[in-house]
Amino acid sequence: MISFTMTDAIRRAFIVVSLASGAFLATLGATTAAKADFRVCNATQSLVGVAIGHRTEEGWVSEGWWRIQPTTCRSIVEGDLKSRYYYLYAEDDKGLGRWAGDIRMCIAENEFRVVGVKDCFSRGFQEMGFREYDTGEQGSWMVQLTETPSEGVADQ
């Protein structure tokens, strides 16, 4: 028969509690793990509207608007990214800030999804310059919009 001292019993109880706590924390971490998305973070003090463009099986698609509150982030494309290149256009609700680029795509004043990038005006859309992001075929990507839109969009 093996006899345990009080110290051995306390040590064994601590190990069991530690293992159980570790398993619980591992489970908690698994349920809250970051998912793969194309996220846009609004580091400004204004509400920002975001439009995105990317290549799909249908061809080039531009769509919007995602409204992103000040100092928050939002997933624009959810899940693993399917394209290497994504294109972003954003503007603030005051009409003072615009994050744009050289790639011309179609947008609309209200919620939209446009297939194709040609003849925007003749199809009833506006044309705007989107900025290109090469994700390097990563599964997720994040863009941060800063208070200085004239300098472009900061990547992170």
Image (cartoon, rainbow, N blue to C red):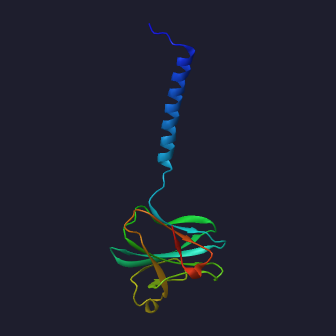
Which residue corresponds to the image point at 39% horizontal and 64% vertical from the top-left?
A: 138
Q: Is residue 44 left or right of residue 118?
A: right
Which residue corresponds to the image point at 53% horizontal and 29% vertical from the top-left?
A: 17
Q: Position of residue 32 (x, y in %)?
A: 51, 50
Depth check, front residue: 122 or 72 = 72
Q: How many marks?
A: 0
Depth check, front residue: 71 or 146 = 146
Q: Position of residue 104 (x, y in %)?
A: 44, 86
Taking the image as drawn, is residue 98 in sight?
A: no
The answer to whether residue 155 is above or below residue 100 is: above
Q: Residue furthest bottom?
A: 122
Taking the image as drawn, is residue 143 in sight?
A: yes
Q: Quadrant of residue 140?
A: bottom left
Q: Quadrant of the N terminus?
A: top left
Which residue corresponds to the image point at 63% horizontal and 66% vertical from the top-left?
A: 71
Q: Position of residue 118 (x, y in %)?
A: 39, 88
Q: Is residue 54 left or right of residue 46?
A: left
Q: Residue furthest left?
A: 57
Which residue corresponds to the image point at 54% horizontal and 13% vertical from the top-left?
A: 5
Q: Position of residue 105 (x, y in %)?
A: 44, 84
